[in-house]
Amino acid sequence: MDTKLIKEVTDWLKTTDLAEFCYAKHGQSIEIKTQEALPEPTRFSCSLMPVCSPAIGIYHSAEKGKNLILSEGQTVAQGETLGWVETVQKKHKITAPVSGKLRAITAQEGAAVEFGLPLFFIEP
């Protein structure tokens, strides 16, 4: 494609409110995008704090013989036990990093979990 034509199309595009321009003829094509056409990265703002699995293993809400029932909307204190992740070698205690309300519980009793998987979300 002729570079003179590309320059003319680019200059013309700057005078319009178009964000992108596509043209094809005889098997040749051109596509021009302005800065406005570039997608902006998605930004999330969230006040929820994830509580992630400390290891790969099986999630249990309480130790054997004990009962710990957690529900969404429940208030938890910093350091309060939220459950355990049992691995081959040991049990890893999961505690609330901050005081607040449990807004989401993704952990399921007896489910396999991976390291770093969010199990709870707390709103401080």
Image (cartoon, rainbow, N blue to C red):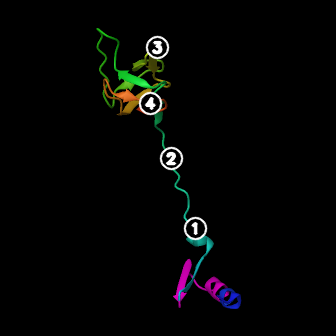
- Pointer 4: residues within 10 angstroms few (<14), some, or many (20+)? some
Which badge, 2 or 1, comes first in the chain's sequence?
1
Q: Give the amino acid at mark 1.
A: Leu
Identify the residue under disc 1. Answer: 38
Q: Secondary structure at mark 4?
A: loop
Using residue 119 as the reference point, say whether residue 26 is left or right of it.
Answer: right
Identify the residue under disc 2. Answer: 45
Separation of residues labelled 1 and 3 (CA atoms)? 50 Å
Q: Give the amino acid at mark 4.
A: Glu
Q: Is residue 95 above or below residue 2?
A: above
* Mark toward the viewer: 2 or 4: 4
Q: Which quarter of the figure is the N terminus placed in?
A: bottom right
Residue range (magenta): 9-26
**How far from the left and from the top, in percent, is residue 84?**
40, 18
Q: Quadrant of residue 69?
A: top left
Q: Secondary structure at mark 1?
A: loop
Which badge, 3 or 4, comes first in the chain's sequence?
3
Identify the residue under disc 3. Answer: 89
Any part of residue 28 in sight:
yes
Q: Magenta stretch: residue 16 in it?
A: yes
Which badge, 1 or 4, comes first in the chain's sequence?
1
Separation of residues labelled 1 and 4 (CA atoms)? 36 Å
